[in-house]
Image (spheres, rainbow, N blue to C red):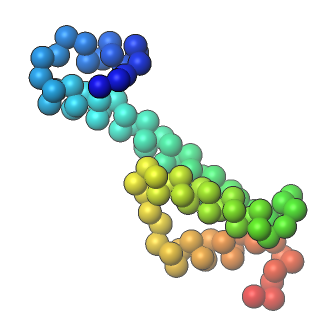
Amino acid sequence: MNVNDTVLKKIEGELFVYICWKRLEKLYSSTIEIKEFQLIKKLFSITYKGLKNINQYINLFDETLKNLHNIGYNMPDDLVVKMMIFQLSSLFESF
């Protein structure tokens, strides 16, 4: 196992792998929850305004969704589509 010094101090001296694993889970679970919150907040704040084209908008949205997926959070597809359409500017009201 390879961990940095800060994390090593949290598990140093433990004899059992199970206890080390539980401490690591506890340590990183709050980090993942914070990252999840930040990514969801980012997803809700993405708008078309200020971007050069629709591809940038879609790519930014997709990148954020992939980051959420990588930490184990998956949004329902229908919600994603609704969010993407809702957050477009008034230039796309003909949908």
Q: Quadrant of the image for the C terminus?
A: bottom right
> In front: 78, or 6?
6
Determine whether, in the image, residue 63 is placed left or right of residue 15.
right
Image position of 11 with respect to 87: above or below: above
x and y percentages locating residue 9 in the rendered image: 32, 12
Closest to the observer, 4 or 36 = 4
Q: Position of residue 75 (x, y in %)?
A: 47, 66
Q: Nearer the viewer, residue 85 or 18?
A: 18
Q: Describe residue 27's horizontal placement relative to residue 70 as left or right.
A: left
Compared to 95, does 73 lie above or below? above
- The quarter of the image holding the N terminus is top left
Residue for point 12% across, 17% down: 15
Question: Left of 41 or right of it: where is 56?
Answer: right
**Total numbered badges shown on the rendered structure:** 0
Q: Is residue 44 visible?
A: no
What residue is at 77 percent from the left and 68 percent from the top?
Answer: 55
**Outermost residue to the left:** 16
Residue 94 coordinates in the image, percent (x, y): 81, 88
Q: Residue furthest bottom?
A: 94
Question: 57 above or below 23?
Answer: below
At x 60% / y 76%, what residue is drawn? 81
Q: Position of residue 24 (x, y in %)?
A: 29, 29
User: In this picture, is 77 found above or below 23?
Assistant: below
Left or right: 5 with respect to 95? left
Residue 34 visible in the shown view: yes
Residue 57: image quadrant is: bottom right
